[in-house]
Amino acid sequence: MSRTVPSRISRRTALRGAAVAGTAGLGLTACSTGSGDGAAAAPTAPVDLGKATEVPAGGAKLYNDEHVVVSRTRDDTDGAYKAFSTICTHAGCPIRMLEGTELTCNCHGSKFDATTGKVLHAPATEPLEELAVEVRGGKLVVRPKK
């Protein structure tokens, strides 16, 4: 009758294996579709974003909690504003990075122009959803266009 002797591995080997397994799991999570937070969606009703003057003339402001980016072309109180959903059209991830007027999705690297919603870099192929935006009493209000 043979007896199996349990093998002993060092703590270092066990931790190294766990780290590799954890890294593999993270990679799979990053490549999944959707945001993972279950709540990422463009506004479905009017949303007050606050003072219109917080959006710089010639620039853009990202509103992470509302999943909206607003850009402004003119330097006056009623400047020409544009708003877009910041839900990436590639896999539905919320976009959380804005540099100047360029949005970058941290899920897969798609880039969008915050002033037009157009795709600047794949893998996304569709532009961001445009939202209606207006200034009411000095505050920005966005809502779906549809």
Image (spheres, grey):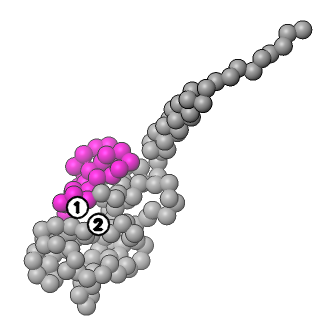
- Asked if residue 126 lies in the magenta stretch, the reply is no
* Residue range (magenta): 98-125
Location of the N terminus (image quadrant): top right
Q: Total marks drawn?
A: 2
Residue at 36%, 45% in the rendered image: 108
Residue at 57%, 27% in the rendered image: 13
Can residue 74 be seen from the camera position used here?
Answer: yes
Q: Is residue 57 left or right of residue 137?
A: left
Asked if residue 77 is positioned above or below residue 30 in the image, the reply reads below
Residue found at the far top of this picture: 1
Residue at 56%, 33% in the rendered image: 15
**Percent coordinates x, y for residue 146 in the rendering:** 36, 71
Image disc number at residue 62: 2
- What distance separates the C-alpha of mark 2 from that of mark 1? 9 Å
Image disc number at residue 114: 1
Tags 2 and 1 touching, CB below 8 Å: yes
Q: Is residue 129 left or right of residue 56?
A: right
Give amino acid for label 1. Ala
